């Protein structure tokens, strides 16, 4: 199921996704255009604020974990070890990168510059749309993976697993 609020989180309404698979992430392009991802290659799109959902998995071959859209047409989807990109609002997905570690989070500031967080306690950065990545190890490798990442300008934040660390 998907939950929706229209009053800042005071109340939540259940919306049916139309699938029985576990959902992992959601992205709002605007108030009406939403994407939801989850297990077994699940990519769902809504164009009416979540009232109805359609499947948009053409080209994705792994379980989806995270999704990020720059604008209505251009988005990226992390699916286990693969990173996919769409340039036609999710109608088709193109494989851009395969990692040896699970991709747990992603954020792009434009079509070329983006970051991924990896299960192997790394953060990767691309400046060529996801074709190649430079990685760094910002945390103790005995901790959990980095589960999500977000940037405003040059400042970024990343959340780790169950050890409670927030990286900046």
Image (cartoon, rainbow, N blue to C red):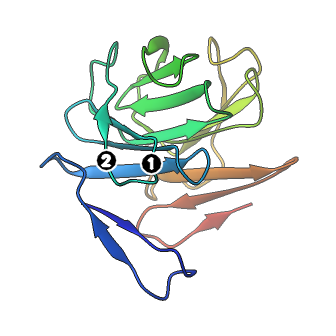
Judging depth in this view, the residue of 99 and 56 nearest the camera is 56
Which residue in the structure is indicated by mark 1? 48
> Horizontally, is 70 left or right of 161 in the view?
right
Mark identifier at residue 14: none
The N terminus sits in image quarter: bottom left
Q: Residue at x 46, y 59 (%)?
A: 143
In the rendered view, tell whether residue 40 sits above or below residue 24.
Answer: above
Check contact, mark 2 vs mark 1: CB within 8 A.
yes
Q: CA–CA distance between discs 2 and 1?
A: 7 Å
Q: Would residue 156 be seen by someone viewing this image from the given angle?
A: yes
Up-down relation of residue 147 to residue 133 (above or below): below
Which residue is more in the foreground, 121 or 31? 31
Q: Position of residue 3 (x, y in %)?
A: 35, 67
Q: Residues within 10 Å of mark 1 (few under 14, many from 20)?
A: few
Residue 52 badge = 2
In this view, the residue farthest toward the left is 20
**Residue 71, relative to residue 36: is it above or below?**
above
């Amino acid at each position: 199921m998907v939950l929706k609020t229209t009053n800042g989180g005071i109340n939540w309404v259940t919306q049916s996704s139309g699938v029985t698979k576990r959902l992992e992430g959601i992205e709002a392009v605007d108030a009406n255009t939403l994407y939801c991802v989850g297990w077994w290659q699940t990519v769902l799109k809504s164009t009416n604020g979540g009232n109805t959902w359609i499947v948009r998995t053409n080209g994705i071959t792994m379980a989806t974990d995270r999704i990020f859209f720059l604008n209505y047409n251009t988005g990226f989807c992390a699916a286990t070890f693969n990173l996919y990109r769409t340039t036609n609002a999710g109608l088709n997905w193109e494989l851009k990168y395969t990692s040896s570690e699970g991709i747990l989070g992603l954020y792009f500031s434009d079509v070329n510059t983006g970051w991924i967080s990896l299960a192997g306690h790394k953060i990767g950065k691309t400046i060529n749309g996801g074709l190649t990545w430079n990685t760094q190890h910002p945390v103790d490798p005995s901790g959990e993976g980095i589960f999500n990442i977000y940037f405003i300008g040059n400042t970024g934040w990343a959340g780790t697993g169950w050890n409670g660390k927030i990286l900046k």
